[in-house]
Amino acid sequence: MKTYQKNILILSCSLGFGAIFNPAFANVQLCKTAPLIVTKKNVGSVSYYADDCKKNWETQNIKLDFSYSQNIPEWAFKRAATYFLKKNVPSFSDDSSLNTITELYRPVKKGDLYSLSYTQNSKTLSLSLNQKSLGAITDQQSNQYFKIWFGSSPFNAKLKQQLLNQ
């Protein structure tokens, strides 16, 4: 790692901004942005980032940024996440480490930004709200959380198609 990158990382971590600069995401590129539609209502947008937009999402560093134009209660995130994890992850259960991320959700208001990031080398999934880290898990299956949006029964099939160009 170059000296200036180390200095930025040290500075950002010491200031509590570890979620803002992560060397694993220094080279990710914006692949697509699409509207976030919930029951026919546009509640914001989702941006998909990856090391290589043409590669399979399961084999690289990826990130989803959810920008909200509406207030959404905490329970709605938790209920939807649990429902779509059960539909898309065969090994999902109540004691899954993926539940740790689901439990981190907080209510959002207009203008808030959730970021869900996966680092391939460390198998770490991180969640932040407005660039403040809420928590992370490190697990062999942590990227399976993205199956909420990219699985065979996703949250929104059109959104999946738009983000992954399928």
Image (spheres, rainbow, N blue to C red):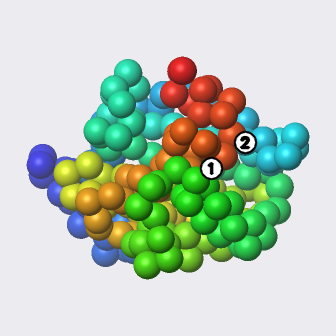
* 113 lies above or below 60: below
Residue 153 sits in quarter: top right
The Cα atoms of the two marked residues, 2 and 1, are separated by 8 Å
Q: Position of residue 146 (x, y in %)?
A: 48, 49
Instruction: Residue under label 1, please give it.
Output: 66
Which of the labelled discs sits on residue 145, or is there none?
none
Q: Amino acid at mark 2?
A: Leu
Is mark 2 in CB contact (under 8 Å) with mark 1? yes
Q: Earlier in the sequence, mark 2 or mark 1?
A: 2
Residue at x-position 79% and y-position 63%: 72
Q: Position of residue 86 (x, y in %)?
A: 56, 60
Visible residue check, residue 130: no
Q: Amino acid at mark 1?
A: Phe
Q: Quadrant of the C terminus?
A: top right
Residue at x-position 26% and y-position 49%: 120
Visible residue check, residue 93: yes
* 147 lies above or below 9: above
Residue at x-position 83% and y-position 42%: 42
Q: Position of residue 58 (x, y in %)?
A: 35, 40
> How many residues crowd mark 1 within 10 Å: few (<14), some (14–19), many (20+)?
many
Nearer to me, 52 or 76:
76
Instruction: Residue under label 2, please give it.
Output: 36
Residue 160 sits in quarter: top right
